[in-house]
Amino acid sequence: DDELLVVKQLILDKFFDQFEYITYSDFGFKYLMSDAGYQSKLIFRAPTYLTNSEDVNIYSDMNAYVVLSSEISSQELIDLSKQINKKTIVDLFGQNACFYSRRLLLTNYFLYRNIDKDPSKSTYQVMEELREDFLPIIEDETGTRILEPFNHCLCEEIKELSNVEYGIIMLRNLKNCDAEIVVKAYNALVDDEN
């Protein structure tokens, strides 16, 4: 509720006027933004949720765009894109979050264990008991996220997708030189199908 009070003040200050689109997953935020006249700028993004055409079509009617789930197979994504009635967005590249909490879990862990570490560093990793992959864990002002160990990547699938207008490239945890390589590769793919 305190954060929504901040949003209300940002609305009064016309902060959101400077953006073409605003991505959200919180419905309290959505209703504040809609009431303030920002409905045409809203993009609903809930990676584990928009996995079927009924949900995508319903939420597409409520927003400027929705981001299709990156938690389904490439073939399911292709099939889903052909069953929807409005242009959408897909995640092209990046590490997906497999866990999110608004709590400051690293901060709390370090306090509980009496460990003097900076929880805002992006170099921490966790490992599940039954898996061998190290998963990046990140804490910032929005909470704590555990990321998948590898980057999600759509390439050949792009030409088979329907009803997709934009793609998102997340460059978190990449060096600038690697980020530049990824962006150039997608530009070549889109421009020349190379």
Image (tube, rainbow, N blue to C red):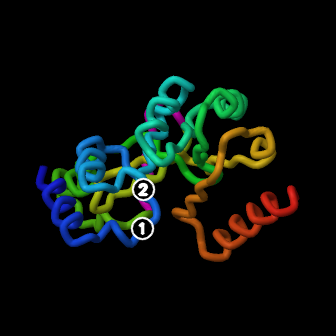
Q: Main secondary structure of the magenta part?
A: loop
> Residue 140 versus residue 62: which sits nearer the camera?
62
Query: What crowding class fits label 1: few (fewer than 14 Cα within 10 Å), some (14-19), or many (20 or more)?
Result: few
Query: How far apart are the two marked residues, 2 and 1, measured between alpha carbons?
Result: 8 Å
> Residue 132 versus residue 5: which sits nearer the camera?
5
Q: Which residue is mark 2?
A: 41
In the image, farthest residue toward the front: 37
Identified at 29% across, 68% down, the residue is 118
- Residue 94 at x, y = what percent? 59, 54
Which label sits on residue 19? 1
Q: How many labels, in total?
A: 2
Using residue 115 as the reference point, say whether residue 145 is left or right of it.
right
Bounds of the magenta span? Answer: 123-131
Using residue 14 as the reference point, say whether residue 194 is left or right of it.
right
- Residue 52 at x, y = what percent? 55, 25
> Residue 91 versus residue 136: which sits nearer the camera?
91
Residue 150: in magenta span: no
> In terms of secondary structure, where does tag 2 sit?
helix
Residue 124: in magenta span: yes
Identified at 39% across, 57% down, the residue is 138
Q: Quadrant of residue 41?
A: bottom left
Q: Amino acid at mark 1?
A: Phe
**Image position of 128 with respect to 90: above or below:** above
Using residue 89 as the reference point, say whether residue 41 is left or right of it.
left
Which label sits on residue 78? none
- Residue 146 at x, y = what percent? 42, 47
Q: Amino acid at mark 2?
A: Lys
Say whether marks 2 and 1 touch (CB < 8 Å).
yes
> In terms of secondary structure, where does tag 1 sit?
loop
Identified at 61% across, 31% down, the residue is 84
